[in-house]
Image (cartoon, helix red, strand yellow):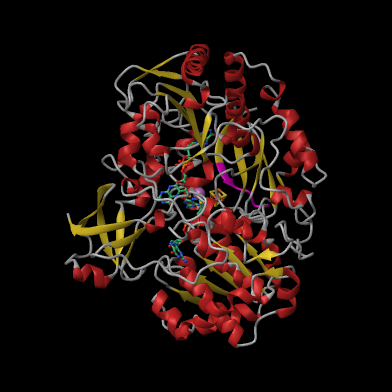
Amino acid sequence: MAGEREIIKTTCPRDCYDGCGIAVVKRDGRIAKVLGDPDHPTARGALCGKCAVAYNGVWLDPEVRLLHPMKRTGPKGSSQFTAISWNEALSTIAERFHAIGRESGFDRILHTHYTGTCSSLAIGFPGRFFARLGATEAEPDTICNNAGHVAWGYVFGDSHIGFDPRTARDSACILVWGANPSHSAPHAHKHWLKESPAKVIVVDPVRHETAAAADLHLQLRPGSDAALAFGLVHVMVREGLIDQAYIDAHVLGWDELQADIAMATPAWTAAQTGLPAAQIEEPARIYGAGPSLLWLGQGLQRQPSGGNIFRACAMLPAASGNIGKPGAGFYYLNDAMGIVARKGAAPAWQPPARAAPEDMPDGPPSVSQMDVPDQLNDASRIRSYVVWNCNPLASNPAQTKMRSGLAREDLFTVVIDCFPTDTAAYADIVLPAASFLEFDDISTSYFHFTIGAQAKAAEPMGQSLPNQEIFRRLATAMGFEDKHLHARDEEMLEKIMARSGTGLSFAQLKEKGWAWGTPEPLVLWLEGSFPTPSGKIELASERAAADGHPRLPRPQADAPPADGRLRLLSPAGKWLMNSLYGNDPRIVELMGQATVAIHPDDARRHNIGDGAAVTLSNAAGCLTLKAVISDIIPAGALLTDKSRWPGKEGGSNVNVLHVPQKTDMGESTSVHGVEVTLSAA
Ligand SMILES: Nc1nc2c(c(=O)[nH]1)N[C@H]1C(S)=C(S)[C@@H](COP(=O)(O)OP(=O)(O)OC[C@H]3O[C@@H](n4cnc5c(=O)[nH]c(N)nc54)[C@H](O)[C@@H]3O)O[C@H]1N2
Ligand SMILES: Nc1nc2c(c(=O)[nH]1)N[C@H]1C(S)=C(S)[C@@H](COP(=O)(O)OP(=O)(O)OC[C@H]3O[C@@H](n4cnc5c(=O)[nH]c(N)nc54)[C@H](O)[C@@H]3O)O[C@H]1N2
Ligand code: SF4
Ligand SMILES: [Mo]
């Protein structure tokens, strides 16, 4: 019927804390508008600015999306392709994989993936194929947050159980440390933080919007956070804000830390962090008095000493007993579905050598994303590179080296994406992925305890297919008949729902659009037992020591950059989701020219005026940006955003400067530790 209007409720599956509900408005069977779901507790009727533009822009635009499989017809990087059938694409890939397997072993196939889409099947199912194939995996979290996971794995035994944000109604203090909700969790910034009765404290070198709106902002030097953590605990001890009963029952290593805590006076801490000594006492008092929530950002651990920083920050809740009561807790990431399924109870301790699930045999050892630039350039090591759900030429370190690796004529490269990215330009075979609007799935937030249905609102555009269907077909082309490689979506979705603890079927979830994991806020870690070997919070960790780390967190700060260098921060920007949306013309217009913020003292020292073109350089490369003179960052540091499309920026983005130095733990990216020299362009 002409003018017929239909609303489909779905969920935003981006790598974002918010996990917004979406209302897709259809007219005459076609998507007319993608809006925030008015009934969703996070979205409250509005998407963030970037999604509001891109979901109604490039995501719906068949002129921009990848519509059919393609094979390369020109030099690598030239984006010369011709359309081919799915059969030809898949049989070409299968033949090449079999040849590589025969000649050198399947582990010479490197696959890389991350969070392009985070819905359960689209992000998880392809792993079954690669495990069966025996391909090498680029360890996904090493591009993002692995240092924090490893460090809090030592301390708490699990880094995927945080606090339930709903408990903030009982909090007196929320400490946001090294996260920028105003960009990375815009709804949490706008509603959650503002509506809580708590005092908000932000620890960040950048005075971002959340910091500017906070009650207190500690604008410390990058990489000095462990020293600040010791300084805060020092004040808490002095002021009698330590919960000795909690420590006696649940914490290991407190006594051994006393000498370092006593040493970390406000004067010492001020010298280490660049903060005024007077600024160190008030936040310690407010946090220590509690009930307090501690949110450690992913940005925080993207520093050379990110693991030590996480272990040092864990002293705050452990020492003050801000755990296991309403309004108190700590958070890095939430596995909402797992937590709800266990009704909040901590998982049982398991020895580190995890037994592989029956359908996922252990593959060859994974490699750090920090090693990928070198490995891609090594023909004796990697013969094929399969890229799905990520855009490494925009997002990974050592962009120049990444590009030379991708340009290798003998490297068989397959890229699966919704869009013709910079990485896809180097593919031998490009496969078109359907967008989240085009298939059913389940999507949960990694902050809020909401579980969302991803509901199909349109047919896949062109010949594109969901990741899971692509890998079922590839399994067939390879001759893999294993049942788990051919599981149907409906079956898998019902299995997930059955384990979810919500008591809902997928059809019921779809009807509602989303559901709370539990009707009431969950107070986590209530029992005070932790899945560590001792069952306690291990500030002192034998496991860390066995892995070659100090037994205890260290009260240290990175030395300020020497020889006139500056430390470059490139966290999440407002208008992109990693590199996603960098091809949307309206987003490109809203972002304007790429800038770098320079403190007035540094600008004066380098004789740089506002708006001038400046060049940043280091051993990895150089990049020219527009200077913005501002004290939004402290002297000695520079600020730009991550992950524009290199091809739209004259060939390079900030990752041309990203040295793949590994963090102290977890072999992860230390991108916020990058140092550069600055000069007028
Ligand atoms: N300088 C600097 N660099 C950084 C960071 C930083 O802070 N500073 N942050 C790092 C972090 S935290 C991360 S997580 C990484 C992220 O880096 P990447 O994982 O590379 O993330 P994106 O650039 O968004 O790439 C995701 C790709 O997936 C595609 N995609 C979307 N949906 C689908 C789908 O359904 N199927 C398939 N096959 N593809 C899909 C998108 O079109 C997009 O091209 O970047 C890292 N890079
Ligand atoms: N709009 C938008 N949202 C996003 C993304 C995006 O690209 N754009 N990316 C998504 C992804 S993949 C991720 S991992 C998350 C990341 O989101 P967040 O967890 O918020 O992490 P970042 O944005 O990398 O950095 C957050 C803050 O860490 C600060 N920081 C850097 N170095 C230090 C330091 O030494 N000490 C302290 N205290 N702070 C420091 C930065 O100044 C920045 O303000 O965001 C997700 N959401
Ligand atoms: S990216 Fe985040 S803030 Fe934006 S709509 Fe999706 S979930 Fe909401
Ligand atoms: Mo990330």
Residue 74 in view:
yes
From the image, which quarter does the N terminus lie in?
A: top right
Of residue 512 and residue 467, the one placed in the foreground of this image is: 467
Residue 296 screen position, x and y as percent: 56, 63
Q: Is residue 401 left or right of residue 612?
A: right
Magenta stretch: give its range: 34-39
Kindly indicate the quadrant of the structure image that contains residue 632: bottom left
**266 relative position to 590: left or right:** right
Asked if residue 402 lies in the magenta stretch, the reply is no
Q: Does 629 sit above or below residue 241?
A: above
Residue 35 shown in magenta: yes
- Give the x, y percent position of residue 176: 55, 67
Tell me the residue at 49%/40% (across/down).
56
Seen as rendered, the residue at the extreme right is 503
Residue in the foreground of this view, choosing between 342 and 180: 342
Question: Is residue 479 shown above or below 177?
Answer: above
The quadrant in which residue 503 appears is top right
Q: Quadrant of the C terminus?
A: bottom left
Q: Residue 458 appears at what percent x and percent y?
A: 60, 30
Q: How many marks?
A: 0
Residue 198 can be seen, yes or no: no
> Residue 275, image x and y in percent?
41, 78
Left or right position of 578 against 79: right
Q: Nearer the viewer, residue 312 or 72?
A: 312
